Amino acid sequence: MCFSAAQRERKRIFGILGGMFNEKILDHFRTPHNPGELQDASQIVQVTNPVCGDVLKLWVRMGAGRIVAATFKAQGCVPAIAAGSALTDLLVGKTLPEAAQITPQAVSFALGGLPEASFHAAELCGDAIAALKPH
């Protein structure tokens, strides 16, 4: 089988990432859950990690006192994108007080465990949750 240069490079990069991150992290990175903007969002928050420059923007829509939809955009490393994706999964169906109980450790657990050097991505999610305001 003949691969293009771009296909070979993609395979090489994902091979390197596979040595750094577990499959759950890579799955959320490759095919993020709930990416993009959310029309009619009840709240939009944006947080930044001043050390590494990662940015997470989170949209949530409330209905009957619960988060009925959550989407995100992340600019940053592989774990930042994966953590934003996992966060949206964790938020849907929760009240804002329940969402406030989601810890960075819970985000990391949802990803099968972030490497210590990448835990800042889960902390960014914690910052986004803290920025959500009760109505």
Image: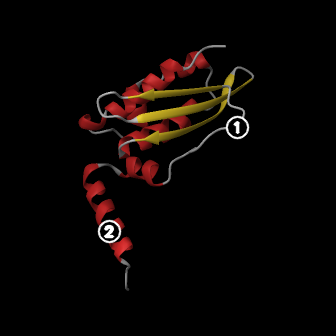
Task: Please give the name of the residue rendered at 30% of the width and 49% of the height, measured from the top-left corner.
Answer: 21
Q: What colouring style does the render use?
A: secondary structure
Residue 100 visible at all? no
Q: Quadrant of the N terminus?
A: bottom left
State the separation of the CA atoms marked 1 and 2: 36 Å
- Judged left or right of residue 66, residue 123 is left
Q: Position of residue 101 (x, y in %)?
A: 49, 19
- Identify the residue position indicated by label 1 in the image: 39
- Dot 2 amino acid type: Glu
Q: Earlier in the sequence, mark 1 or mark 2?
A: 2
Q: Quadrant of the C terminus?
A: top right
- Quarter of the view holding residue 69: top right
The relative height of residue 98 versus residue 84 in the rendered view (above or below) is: above
Numbered disc 1: secondary structure = loop
- Dot 1 amino acid type: Gln
The relative height of residue 92 versus residue 28 in the rendered view (above or below) is: above
- Judged left or right of residue 11, residue 116 is left
The relative height of residue 6 versus residue 126 in the rendered view (above or below) is: below
- Identify the residue position indicated by label 2 in the image: 9
Q: Position of residue 81 (x, y in %)?
A: 43, 43
- Quarter of the view holding residue 51: top left
Task: Please give the name of the residue rendered at 32% of the width and 68% of the height, measured from the top-left corner.
Answer: 9
Q: Position of residue 45 (x, y in %)?
A: 54, 26
- Name the one closer to the observer, 103 or 47: 47
